[in-house]
Image (spheres, rainbow, N blue to C red):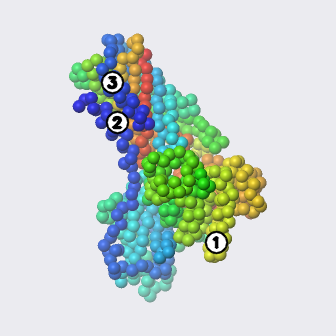
Amino acid sequence: MKLIFCFLFTLLFLNTFAQDTTLHRFKGVFFPYPMDRPAKFSVGLTFTTMPYDITEELHFQIPALDVHLLKRVSKKLALDMRANVQVVQNLLTAGPRWATTLNDRFSISIGNEVGYWFGAVNTEGIRTRGHGFQNVPHLAIGHRFNRRVLLTFRAEALMNFGIKTYAKDTELTSDYRLFGGSTYSLILEQPFYGNKVLTIGLRGIYTDFFWQTWSLFETFDRNIFYPQVIIGLNL
Amino acid sequence: MKSYLPFILLLVFTSCQELIDAPVPDLRWDAFDSPNAKPLTATERKALEGVYSIAIADDNFGKEAALKWTYVASEKDTAYYLSFFCSEDVRYFICQGKRTDSVILLNGYWRNVENTKTGKVHFTISAADLSGGNSSAAEQRLSLQIRGTFGVKDDEPEKKISFSYLRPLNTKIPYYLIAHRGGGRNNDLLPASENSVEMISLAAQLGANGIEIDIQVTKDGVPVLFHDARVNDRLTTKTGIQGAIDSYTFAELEKEVKLKRGGKIPTLKEALDTILTRTPLEFVWIDCKYKEAIPIIRTLQKEYLEKAKSRGRKLEIVIGIPDEDVMAAFMKLPDYKNIPSLCELDTVKAQQVNANIWAPSWVKGHQDEEVNAMHAKGKLAFVYTVDVPKKIKEFMYEAKFNGICTNRPTMAAYYYYARQ
């Protein structure tokens, strides 16, 4: 995993010198900036590494389809909609995002997303299912490099509520902290081929409950670290 | 500087996860370590056991706690530990006791096993209260109070807490309180590695009267306690050894591999020897992860059952049958129907091997009908591995199982010993 991080950060470092055109300007969905177009759309993948604390010897990454739409409401206000899809378990979020520039290079945004996750899998031959809600207030600071490569640092608070998991119709667990943890992301959005923009991001998730692990029924009351890689293409 | 920023962030990003731990605090206490402080007598220890109300607590330890003594024996002497199993938040205390002329001292630590909260505790009890003066034993116990202070991590204990005796421990109907992985998993941040001799020695202090242990086999055919099929960063410190455990001899593992939270990989023989000679544990569930190990496990099971019998020691050792492959290997043993075993498969297969115990997963629910059917045949039923506190209570109070396997044995111990 660390090798992947090293590779991605090296890529990030080198890409700060990449070429671009005016077509790419502020096209990234993560970069906090007033909306200069009706909508921004990105499709990609997230890869979340499940920590040993949760999965024990099964140390693996879970990929998820990541679809992200930013819809202009006014110049500074946008509706941020996102879907994380793994078929057997999915997360849908939506919420407002307000962004403004601080100066020629820096800009910020604040927002709040409300999410609903749901899933169903067979565990030891038993049909288990789960669902729950998230509320995610967030703050992002963006820096535009000389050649319009966009770097975003984003922090989110994770609030989990309404978590219910079942085996057949028997409720298994529902007690988790409301203030479940926080996430910190560093995201690079930079010109790719044509007028596309590539997103490469690293997200550190510190939480006592990560929705993709609902089927493990863990009971920890301490934050566990889930590293996540985000790769996307802004169309 | 700007160019190095990503690399600095990378360093921060990848190093945070190593910081989480819950080490046992420094337990030095001058009054307790004084040469004037003497070990408690068996009578004094026994008088402290019971269910207590938590009268003063500046934190969430719950309303009650069950107090029970256990021990770890060595060749030289025996160390006694008083465990407090609290009703809330999966909290517990583990203390040792001494007495001076006028006062009983209890020195130890507390922990919430679901997170990293821990700290020192110091308790005092009036020796006169414990001896009872002219009052009867029953009257004396009803007035018994344990007063003390607790702290956070290595801070000196300053927050007040006290316990008032309510009633004796429940032990009416035997119940198997089985600690998973020899006592607990590495991710529970206990002061010992899972499936280690040190963890087995700790298990009774955590409330267990039995343990489940996982068996793999080395290249030279030695059964060892190890959960995963491969030597990995989860279970061992980084020594350069990685890969399948059966690709190394036991001598290589013993020389090169250190367990993540201390200790060495033990052989099954060492583990059984520890259980028999050092602990009060009465039940061992040998979870066989490697079907070829069944014959050697059987040999050791037989040897240690005979040793226990010759010492007059109550000890059950069962071979776990987690899947069909192990079941097939088990059924190749001579006279397998008379070998003590535990079957995780369905009740039909449990009866096919004449398992003493049927043990389904908790996600399958109470399964009262199947449990009753096993009871009707004179067999026991356990449920594994229940960790959600309210589910532990539900399975122990509402279902008909005879035992529970858990990573939260302190919680199960409270529900058992405090039951009215």
Question: Residue at label 1?
Answer: B307
- Compared to B326, does A69 lie above or below? above
Give me the C-alpha separation between circle 3 and circle 1. Answer: 68 Å
Label 2: few (<14), some (14–19) or many (≥20) C-alpha neighbours in 10 Å: some
> Residue at left 52%, top 54%?
B252
What amino acid is at disc 2? Answer: Leu
Q: In the rendered view of the protein, which quadrant contains the N terminus of chain B?
A: top left
What amino acid is at disc 3? Answer: Leu
Question: Residue at label 2?
Answer: B10
In the rendered structure, the residue with mark 3 lies on which chain?
A
Give me the C-alpha separation between circle 3 and circle 2. Answer: 15 Å
Give residue A30's position: percent from left, percent from top.
Answer: 37, 25
> Residue at left 67%, top 52%?
B292
Do the residues at pointers 1 and 2 share their chain?
yes
Kind of element beneath mark 3: helix
First of labels 1, 2 by sequence position:
2
Q: Nearer the viewer, mark 3 or mark 2?
A: 3
Q: Nearer the viewer, residue A147 or B216?
A: B216
> Residue at left 39%, top 60%?
B24
Q: Nearer the viewer, mark 1 or mark 2?
A: 1
Q: Nearer the viewer, residue B330 or B280?
A: B330
> Residue at left 26%, top 19%?
A146
Question: Residue at label 3?
Answer: A14
Q: Nearer the viewer, residue B55 or B4?
A: B4
In the rendered structure, the residue with mark 1 lies on which chain?
B
- Left of B306 or right of it: where is A134? left
What amino acid is at disc 1? Answer: Lys
